[in-house]
């Protein structure tokens, strides 16, 4: 299995995993736009318990680097999943979103691909 790894702009925080992605999605909801400061949040979701995170703060694991501010992940402990930001991956070109979600909040200047499923809100259950 190929390793997935990434880190922040300054190199103080990073992550690695040997897990296969659960899914790869781009979320266009307003919460993700605000959290990332970007028009959408592209991420690779893997099992939370399969990721090793190195953090600039030994006492508290954060979803961003406390030194440079890079957003690295979003964690859902209840579902044992963590979304690794595609922009922080060491090899971001290895993955492409298999779906776009919450496109009802998409910025109108962001084009969507014709060959990838798009959902007005979350993906079907």
Image (cartoon, rainbow, N blue to C red):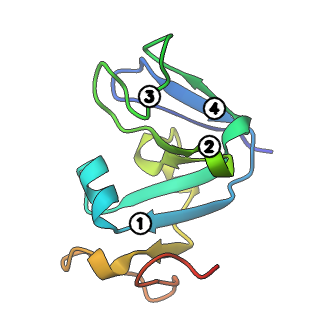
Crowd band around label 3 with a 10 angstrom C-alpha radius: few (<14), some (14–19), many (20+): some
The secondary structure type at the circle numbered 2 is helix
The nearer-to-camera label among 4 and 1 is 1
Q: Give the tally of numbered discs.
A: 4
Q: Earlier in the sequence, mark 3 or mark 2?
A: 3
The residue that mark 1 highlights is 27
The secondary structure type at the circle numbered 1 is strand
The secondary structure type at the circle numbered 3 is loop
Q: CA distance from mark 2 to mark 4?
A: 18 Å
89 or 118: which is nearer to us?
118
Q: CA distance from mark 1 to mark 3?
A: 20 Å
Seen in the image, is 33 located left or right of residue 5? left
Residue at the extreme top of the image, as rendered: 58
Q: Are marks 3 and 2 in contact (CB under 8 Å)?
A: no
Q: Are marks 4 and 3 in contact (CB under 8 Å)?
A: no
Q: Are marks 4 and 1 in contact (CB under 8 Å)?
A: no
Q: Earlier in the sequence, mark 2 or mark 4?
A: 4
Percent coordinates x, y for residue 67 in the rendering: 30, 18
Q: Residue at x 74, y 51 (%)?
A: 20
Q: Is residue 61 visible?
A: yes
Q: Earlier in the sequence, mark 1 or mark 3?
A: 1
Residue 100 shows which numbered tag? Answer: none
The residue that mark 3 highlights is 62
Q: Residue at x 37, y 26 (%)?
A: 65
Q: Residue at x 26, y 62 (%)?
A: 39
Q: Are marks 1 and 2 in contact (CB under 8 Å)?
A: no
Percent coordinates x, y for residue 27 in the rendering: 41, 66
Residue 16 shows which numbered tag? Answer: 4
Q: Earlier in the sequence, mark 4 or mark 1?
A: 4
């Amino acid at each position: 299995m190929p390793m997935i790894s990434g880190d922040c702009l300054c190199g103080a925080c990073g992550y690695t995993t040997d897990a296969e992605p659960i899914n790869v999605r781009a979320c266009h909801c307003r919460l993700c736009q605000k959290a990332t400061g970007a028009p959408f949040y592209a991420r690779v979701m893997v099992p939370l318990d399969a990721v090793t995170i190195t953090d600039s703060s030994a006492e508290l694991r954060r979803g961003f680097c406390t030194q440079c501010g890079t957003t690295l992940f979003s964690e859902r402990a209840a579902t044992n999943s963590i979304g690794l930001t595609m922009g922080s991956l060491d090899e971001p070109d290895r993955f492409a979103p298999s779906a776009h979600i919450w496109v009802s909040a998409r910025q109108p200047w962001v084009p969507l691909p014709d060959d990838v499923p798009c959902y007005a809100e979350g993906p079907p259950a």
